Amino acid sequence: MTTETGAPRNKTLIDCHVHLAALPDGDNGCFISPKMLRSPLFRFLLWKHDLSPAHPRETNARYLEHLMTELRASEYVQKVVLLGMDGFYDQTGLLNRQHTEFLISNDYVLNTAKSYPDLFLAGPSINPQREDAVDEVHRVADAGGVLVKALPNAQHFNPADPRYKPFYRALAERKLPFLSHVGYEFSLIGKDQSVGDPDRLQVALDEGATVIAAHACSYGLIFYEKFIPTLRDLVNRYPNFYCDISALTLPNRLRMLLYLRHYPDLHDRLLFGTDYPLSVFHLAAWGRVGFGTLGRMIRTKNRFDRQVEVCRGLRLGFRSLGDILSST
């Protein structure tokens, strides 16, 4: 594939943070609550992608079609990691659907990635509170998963709980990075936002797991980045600690993006990600890059490529997930 100028495209990046959205169709093991179906964010995503909740199979296929079309058109991104979403588990380790906003099953993630191996990698989601969490680590590893995703705020677990040490040791054994949400969670209802503190990921790090803190440890509240000292501390103390740069162009996370651009010593620990299907903005670049560079960002409609253009234009260095998968 080539660019408009005829030069070969440098499609070497892996986006480590892409959400696989799906409606339950009776076979895919997914779930979504009536409350989530009525939420403004979900309705906006349905409108933006021209999707209909009345026809789940067609809707799921269309979401994938849109994603694949944009990915194939990308100048820089070769593959993406499709992320699942586990549910809420009670103190006995059993799934509680009443407290689960939505669930994207690991089987659906694994099967989708297997169907399009040239485009997708599998990022199953495992809540360590589930009774079979360790067994599920081994199952998804055997099935081709490349990392495990968690969202403590919505999945209602504390990453620092020592009961999860066997889970983290299993991740380390199977060389599956643990990608964990950091900061506030707005898309889903979280009862305890404090579990988004990156300091709580030290238990996983101490057990030898490779940890990827989502959103570069951004707190997620506009212009208030309380986790900057924690980010620097974890980078200095743990060679197995990384961050992704997903969602950093969103207005509520801009301060972390603008901070990181001035600290190239941290860039070796940053991994490329977008948080697709969320939008990518060029607001942070205004007044900070030349008109030609800004114009290129504005003209770039592909979300994967705009994330690259904005971050590189601001001199924010990053690596690809493939760099650490080969070394974990």
Image (cartoon, helix red, strand yellow):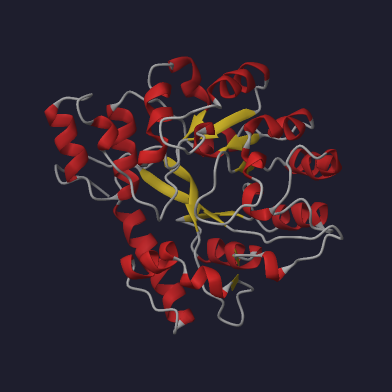
State whether residue 151 appears in this view: no
Q: Position of residue 4 (x, y in %)?
A: 15, 46
Q: Nearer the viewer, residue 141 or 196?
A: 196
Q: Residue at x 66, y 27 (%)?
A: 240
173 displayed left or right of 253:
right
Q: Is residue 230 above or below residue 93?
A: above
Q: Is residue 12 above or below residue 74?
A: above
Q: Nearer the viewer, residue 223 or 275?
A: 223
Quadrant hosting residue 108: bottom right
Q: Is residue 28 above or below residue 146?
A: below
State whether residue 99 appears in this view: yes
Count the marks: how many?
Answer: 0
Q: Position of residue 2 (x, y in %)?
A: 23, 46
Q: Residue at x 47, y 72 (%)?
A: 38
85 displayed left or right of 167:
left
285 displayed left or right of 216:
left
Quadrant hosting residue 181: top right
Q: Position of residue 118 (x, y in %)?
A: 46, 56
Q: Residue at x 58, y 56 (%)?
A: 189
Q: Where's the C terminus, which quadrant?
A: top right
Q: Nearer the viewer, residue 115 or 204?
A: 204
Q: Nearer the viewer, residue 126 or 194?
A: 194
Q: Position of residue 229 (x, y in %)?
A: 57, 19
